[in-house]
Image: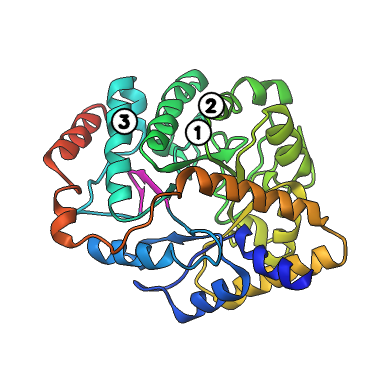
Amino acid sequence: MRRELRRHMGQLIMAGFAGPEVPVELRALAREFDLGGVILFARNVETPDQVAALAFEAARLGLERPVWVSVDQEGGRVARLKAPFTEWPPMLALGRSGDEGLTRRFAEALAVELSAVGVTLDYAPVLDVHTNPSNPVIGDRALGERADEVARLGRIIVDTLQRNGIAACGKHFPGHGDTEVDSHHALPIVEHPPDRIRAVELVPFEAAVQAGVAMIMTAHVLYPAFDDERPATLSASIVTGLLREELEFEGVIATDDLEMTALTGRSTIEEAAVLAVEAGCDVLLLCGEDADRHASVLEALIHAVESERVPVSRVEDAVARQRRAKERFLVNRERRRPPTMAQLRSLLGTPAHVAIAEEMASFL
């Protein structure tokens, strides 16, 4: 069982790495554990053809099924792919426009550019409702200040990305919009009662679930109304009780980066990973560059299963959800070779896409 467990445990990981090529250490990790996916950052990006070649190689790291090639490409200040990719305004622009057609055209253009370089999963849209002007981390990343508007436009982004072959990941469940602390640096707390959270924060996520969103990312935020000890990412009452059972979400549940201080300030990353899987998370984001740390997390998960702290069935369920999502988005995506720069020029930063970005920016 241990060999089979090791072979599949890597499916629970989205790994970061250094540099513009797939490093030897990541290849070794994938061979031993079977990797679920990789996440790209600015440190991995040089030119579009280099990104396409990197994605081409990364997608083939999986032993039995393709690897997700994922990225945070929201627009505004959270965009890993810069010019000559289209540089999109922040999502607040779409919220202020209120224009469903513009929102759809944006998501279509975004999907074209991501697909062109082999990205298969985008950590977007942000579904947080921006109800706190002092929020240091969400701000103009949110579509707006009203739950119904965020839900309406967020659902269009989810549907359009996915109709065009890009898996969407709504974030940050159950809502990061009314916080005053950045979870990269400390643990935020949302003090609202359950009725308020259901009436505001959860509304866009419900809409995304109804739209068939492939993945939802949890927030490293404490919600005492549902769990006064553990942040959402580590809380079974929130991940399983609220998202899986109450909202009836059947897709993949991913954590935000486990290396953020909101979690590492309270426990080791290995313990946080075990707690997250116990809570019901299916995918763990490890955004740092250290493959040894990634391996340490995987060994901790294997030990947790072998010691019967985490049921084998919990891991099997997570792997099965990954498999279904990959069958939905990654089948028939094989390429014989990555596109050349000449081929990419006709798809990235085109006049039509730039015109959409300029129309969005006019609302800021």
Residue that mark 2 sits on: 204
At label 3, the amino acid type is: Ala
Q: Which residue is mark 1?
A: 127
**Quadrant into which the C terminus falls:** top left
Q: Nearer the viewer, residue 298 or 173?
A: 298
Q: Which residues are magenta?
A: 71-79
Q: Write down the residue under mark 3.
A: 93
Across and down, in percent, residue 89 comes to 28, 39
For the N terminus, which image quadrant? bottom right
Type of amino acid under label 1: Leu
**Farthest right residue in view:** 308
Identify the residue shown where x is 60% and y is 44%. Answer: 252
343 within the magenta span: no
Q: Is residue 82 left or right of residue 39?
A: left
What's the residue at 87%, 61% (across, down)?
308
Q: Residue at x 67, y 61 (%)?
A: 265
Q: Nearer the viewer, mark 2 or mark 3?
A: 2
> Viewed as shown, does residue 114 lie left or right of 214?
left
Q: Mark 3 or mark 1, which is nearer to you? A: 1
The numbered mark, 1 or 2, whose residue comes first in the sequence reads 1
Q: Amino acid at mark 2?
A: Pro
Measured in 3D between alpha carbons, the distance from the residue under mark 2 to the one under mark 3, in whole angstroms, is: 17 Å
- Res 210 seen here: yes
